[in-house]
Image (cartoon, grey):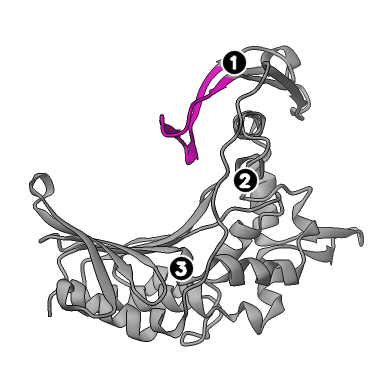
């Protein structure tokens, strides 16, 4: 069967791209509105990913914690950590999950047909039917929980919590987050999608589940398939096993535009340095300028132009205009 003959999908555009020897399709799932991009060619390294626009409204790291958590067992694959099992035992050429400031993606790739089908199946089941609703311990493990340290003091712990403590120890990373917040103070880009360790413990289990219910829906998804495979067969599997179980939903995940500033903005933030380091050699100066919509992207944050100048001291200073 050809892609054009599938009754569950509408072909919006079909185009041949000779430069990459490919036939491409842009499709829409009729029942849910899920968007699908296909790149059909003779490349044996087959690729699948599903992505969702995830636009957090705070810096609790809910999108990042959810990215970790959905890969901790699902309806058809109820083992503790299928991601680790796939990493150890599959023939994948790529296997990951990535949280960006405004979207989350789950990409896999393999040259083996059966392995590729299994990878796609595991990932689809993980994002649509994760065990997070049945097992709060997944949220506590991947997000945050209380525990007693070696001195008997109560402290926070958690996979993402500890990961982001490490990320926030980098002055470069702190500086980039600060300039992004300065440029887009009224949009989702002012939030730390990975999670601010000071804010992560504010996230509740109910908020965590609500985020999945809201954003992990086919109507808010983009599916991508690339390589040498039967595209119609893959789309049929995706529809019959997952998409057809849902109805269309209006998901508010749009990213608002930031209004131009009336005057330049200046912000200063201090950051810790190690004992013995010279503060005069640890100052960072950054200047940023917002761009009109549609005039470029940088590091997953659209419409921003940044240039960095490194100086001396123990502070991060940025300006935006």
Residue 154 point in image, percent of width and height: 89, 61
Judge the density around disc 3: few (<14), some (14-19), many (≥20) Cα neighbours within 10 Å: many
Labels 2, 3: front one:
3
Q: Which mark is residue 188?
A: 2
Is there any visible trace of residue 283 in the rendered image? no
Is there any visible trace of residue 94 in the rendered image? yes
Residue marked by disc 3: 219
**Quadrant of the rendering where the N terminus is positioned:** bottom left
Q: Earlier in the sequence, mark 1 or mark 2?
A: 2
What is the distance, in whole Å, between disc 2 and disc 3 at their CAs?
20 Å
What is the distance, in whole Å, between disc 1 and disc 2 at their CAs?
27 Å
Q: Say which residue appears at 62% left-offset and 50% top-offset.
A: 194
Residue 187 point in image, percent of width and height: 63, 42
Q: How many marks?
A: 3
Q: Which mark is residue 310?
A: 1
* Closest to the observer, 321 or 209: 321
Labels 3, 1: front one:
3
Which residues make up the magenta segment?
Answer: 288-308
* Closest to the observer, 135 or 255: 255
């Amino acid at each position: 069967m050809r892609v054009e003959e599938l009754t569950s999908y509408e072909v919006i555009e079909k185009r041949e791209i000779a430069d990459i020897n490919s036939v491409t399709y842009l499709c829409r799932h009729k029942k849910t509105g899920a968007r699908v991009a296909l790149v059909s060619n003779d490349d044996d390294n087959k690729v699948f990913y599903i992505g969702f626009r995830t636009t957090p409204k705070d810096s609790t790291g809910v999108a990042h914690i959810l990215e970790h958590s959905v890969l901790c067992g699902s309806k058809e694959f109820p083992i503790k950590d299928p991601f680790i099992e796939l990493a150890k035992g599959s023939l994948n050429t790529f296997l990951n999950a990535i949280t960006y400031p405004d979207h989350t993606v789950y990409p896999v790739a393999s040259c083996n047909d059966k392995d590729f089908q299994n990878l796609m199946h595991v990932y689809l089941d993980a994002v649509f039917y994760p065990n997070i609703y049945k097992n709060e311990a997944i949220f506590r493990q991947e997000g945050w929980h209380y525990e007693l340290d070696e001195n008997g003091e109560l402290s926070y712990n958690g996979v993402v919590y500890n990961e982001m403590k490490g990320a926030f120890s980098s002055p470069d990373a702190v500086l980039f987050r600060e300039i992004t917040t300065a440029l887009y103070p009224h949009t989702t880009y002012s939030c730390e999608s990975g999670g601010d360790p000071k804010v992560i413990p504010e996230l509740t289990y109910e908020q965590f589940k609500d985020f999945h219910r809201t954003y992990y829906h086919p109507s808010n998804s983009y599916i991508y398939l690339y390589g040498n495979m039967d595209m119609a067969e893959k789309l049929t599997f995706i529809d019959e096993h997952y998409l057809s179980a849902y109805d269309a939903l209006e998901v508010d995940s749009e990213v608002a535009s930031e209004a131009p500033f009336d005057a330049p903005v200046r912000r200063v933030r201090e950051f810790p340095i190690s004992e013995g380091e010279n503060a005069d050699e640890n100052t960072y100066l950054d200047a940023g300028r917002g761009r009109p919509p549609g005039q470029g992207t940088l590091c997953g944050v659209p419409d921003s132009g940044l240039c960095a100048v490194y100086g001396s001291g123990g502070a991060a200073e940025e300006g935006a205009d």
